[in-house]
Image: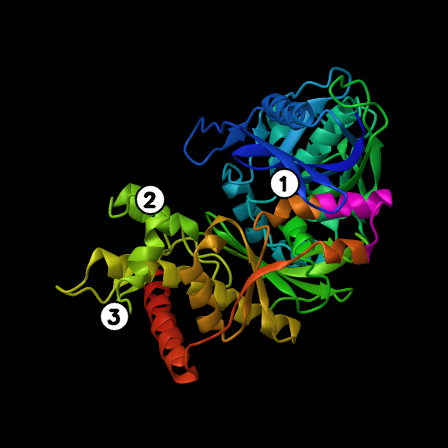
Amino acid sequence: MPRHDAILGIDEGTTGTRAVLAGMDGTVLSASYRDIPLHTPRPGWVEQDAAVVWNRTADAIRQVLDEHPDVRVVAIGITNQRETSVLWNRATGEPVHPAIVWQCRRTADRCRQLRDEGMASEIAETTGLVIDPYFSGTKVEWMLHGLGVQRDDAAGLAFGTMDTWLIWNLTGAAAHVTDMTNASRTMLFDIERREWSAELLDLLGVPRSILPEALPSAARFGETRGLGFLSDGIPVCGVAGDQQAALFGQTCLEPGSAKNTYGTGCFLLMHTGNQRPRSAHGLLTTLACDERGGPAYALEGSVFIGGAAIQWLRDGLGILATARESEALARSVPDAGGVVFVPALTGLGAPYWNPDVRGAVFGLTRGTTRAHLVRAALEAIAHQSADVVEAMAGDAGTPLDVLRVDGGAAANDFLMQMQADLLGTPVERPSVIETTVMGAILLAGIGSGVWSPSDARARWRVERRFEPEMEASERALRRNEWRDAVARLTAGSA
């Protein structure tokens, strides 16, 4: 039987892990998915068993390989949920504490203390981040303190985000590494010097000895060893956090190019090249990838409630049977009937950063139907993303020419057209919506030398382009109605 070369992509997400085999032309040959359970031992706490994450990932890899016994894997790429933190014993390879997931809020008081101590400016200048439990720094501090580990006692421990944990297991404990995009999300990494910050490590009591080496996203991270289901010596050559991997997978590699991922929330990244922007609108500065997988800068804005607004209408109010039904319902009415829905169900993210505000629906009348509410919810997703795009354009000093989109909700044609209309900018949807794992595969292809940057670009294809159809006067009216609704909410929470 002839052998065919392929690249293995691993997409380790918050609620599941996926393995994908891609041929040398970028075509997906096979994919396998495994659920990963989340545990909430206390309100606001979110944990995972890191050993389960590895075992489920290994199971997904086995399945795609079993389906293609004629395939020879030449490189591995990894993308992962960012900020989720793992601490393990170097000698045994066993986690010493449940992994603390990015969603976990257990260190909120510690973050508040750091802000009260006046550390916000220093941390923002060094890391590009705001002080928040979202990031890994206070998570690892919490684990070390809870285990009673002093700085001098930590030599036998290893820390990492999920990419580091997977590489450790793939390489038989030979490689303790991460990439710079994941490192930049820890609140411990100097994004200009591209190294761990001694000052922040000292501030949070994190020993340098437990941290991985940070490499560019396309690099030689290590080789498989002792797995049984994968041959020894396969190089792990591409690693990036999920949103940066999606940016790369969308081939947004020039300053001003941007992508938006529509999932439970919305994550919008704009590439800014080798120039570090400093946001005046509450956006994050993070490390992304240049065309060769080396470090570059990006602005990031997170919308907390995107597709979750439709989930809430379905599960919370029961006015939808399925999320897919939302598009047909929205099209069944000519407009939202004056209804404006601000879905601040968990506060407002970028560019407002107001955790205390609560959601509201304005403009209800006796004539309001469930179709109007559904349409208003979809419009709200587009409005929130438009807010972030406008903030990014102001920070970057670069207008947006086109927005590339991915994620599950990007399949909704009504939402994509509304996004183009409210931005006044074309929206491009690729033929493969799941661009996160494709970003990892492209990085692995470049890092292993089997693809050039131009080869990677050639593997991105547009499936549909949505051109703005809304008149400028109508767009201004809609945007002003939205801004007024948000202002009324944020004024009430001040």
> Can I make out residue 459 in this image?
yes
* Mark before the other along the chain sequence, 1 or 3: 1
Q: Depth check: give the residue in front, 262 or 193.
A: 262
In the rendered image, which quarter contains the C terminus? Answer: bottom left
Residue 386: give x, y in percent of width and height: 48, 67
Look at the image and give the residue range highlighted in magenta: 441-453
219 relative to 375 in the view: left or right: right
Q: Residue at x 41, y 82 (%)?
A: 471
Q: Amino acid at mark 1?
A: Ser
Q: Amino acid at mark 2?
A: Thr
For discs 1 and 2, the disc positioned in front in the rendered view: 2
Which residue sits at x=78%, y=64%?
274
Q: Marks 1 and 2, Cα distance to the nearest angstrom?
A: 35 Å
Name the residue type under label 3: Gly
Main SS category, magenta section: helix
Q: Give the quarter of the image for residue 27.
A: top right
Look at the image and tell me in which quarter the N terminus lies.
Answer: top right
Q: Which residue is mark 1?
A: 136
Q: Nearer the viewer, residue 342 or 456?
A: 456
Q: Which mark is residue 460?
A: none
Residue that label 2 marks: 322
Of label 1 and label 2, which has the lower sequence position?
A: 1
Give percent across and percent down for residue 225.
82, 22
Task: Please name the residue that numbered disc 3 is placed on.
Answer: 338
Q: Are marks 1 and 2 in contact (CB under 8 Å)?
A: no
Instruction: Give the Cα separation between the discs numbered 1 and 3.
Output: 42 Å
Secondary structure state at the residue bearing disc 1: loop
Vertical side of 494 occupied by 163: above or below: above
Pinpoint residue 315: horizontal percent, then vertical percent. 30, 41
Q: Is residue 306 left or right of residue 1?
A: left
- Magenta region includes residue 443: yes
**Residue 311 at what x, y percent from top left?**
36, 45
